Amino acid sequence: MTIKILHLYPKNMNLYGDHGNVLAIRRRLEWRGIDVEVIHHDPGDELPEDIDIIFGGGGQDSGQTVVEDDLRIITPKLKELIENGTPALVICGLYQLFGNYFETVEGQKLEGTHILDINTIGGPVRLIGNVLIDTTEFGQVVGYENHSGLTYLGDGVKPLGTVITGDGNNGKDKTEGVRYKNCIGTYLHGPILPKNPKVTDFLISKAIENKTGEAPQLKELDDTIELRAHNVSSKRPR
Ligand code: GLN
């Protein structure tokens, strides 16, 4: 079995170590003896047929403008995959663009994929710093945020978690990120996955389940270092 990870726009959307997220998925699969293939998708590329996990990172407003047209072209296929339960993690810039729209602080409206029922509007200040959230599925999740976009959730989605430290989606309603089907949207960079192995294993489990038709019993890994990083980060002040 080979798990294929689609990495969306690695050149334009890769802030604060987002490549480390793909590396974390790769390593946790390899440590369990499962083959991995990472497929980079840049503007103009054809999407591959088989995709088991979708990953998209963060980027500046300018990077989002570069990928917007291509994203519109591949939206039907991405939508079909997400609706069919393909696990996905989209962070910050691509989290915003997986929603309905992102209106920048200059008033430029970037059309999103409408896969996630969220709307984002550029705010006057940047929300920057360490973040700790509480989630029902993964316990406490740690990360780092840096965005000016303020995201508001529609009726079709649930938040990923509740903010303990930081601003989250909009600095007001204490929500952070989004959960929809097996897609996670979040503002958490860090990169998020190495420090939150439960989130990584969620993506891996769902990918294997979709491929084999059975929820796997994932082999336990020694997470001493990952959990130490998680614990140190969770105690950091804003
Ligand atoms: N450009 C977006 C914002 O500032 C996304 C930033 C990011 O991906 N870190 O809101």
Image (cartoon, rainbow, N blue to C red):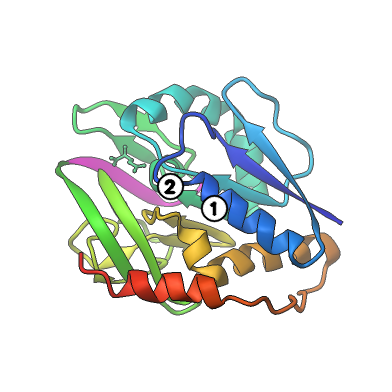
User: Is residue 90 rendered to the left or right of residue 129?
Assistant: right
Measured as percent of width and height from the top left, residue 70 is found at 54, 25
Q: What stretch is highlighted in magenta?
A: 115-123
Decide: few, some or many residues near mark 1? Use Cα within 10 Å; few <14, some 14-19, many ≥20.
Answer: many
| Residue sitting at x 53%, y 29% | 72
Quarter where residue 109 is shown:
top left
First in sequence: mark 2 vs mark 1 = 1
User: Is residue 187 rendered to the left or right of residue 115?
Assistant: left
Q: Disc 1 marks which residue?
A: 21
223 or 167: which is nearer to us?
223
Measured as percent of width and height from the top left, residue 100 is found at 40, 42
Measured as percent of width and height from the top left, residue 112 is found at 43, 37
- Whether 122 is among the magenta residues is yes
Q: What element carries label 2?
A: helix
How far apart are labels 2 and 1 at the CA level? 15 Å
Q: Is mark 1 on a helix, strand or loop?
A: helix
| Residue sitting at x 36%, y 53% | 187
Mark 2 or 1: in front is 1
Compared to residue 216, the image places residue 9 above or below, namely: above
Measured as percent of width and height from the top left, residue 133 is found at 34, 71
Q: Can residue 52 be seen in this view?
A: yes
Q: Disc 2 marks which residue?
A: 95
Q: In which quarter of the image is ligand 1?
A: top left
Q: Can residue 134 be seen in this view?
A: no
Quarter where residue 16 is shown:
top left
Majority secondary structure of magenta residues:
strand
Query: Which amino acid type corresponds to the residue marked 2 in the rendered image?
Result: Tyr
Q: In which quarter of the image is the N terminus?
A: bottom right
Query: Which amino acid type corresponds to the residue marked 1 in the rendered image?
Result: Asn
| Residue sitting at x 49%, y 23% | 69
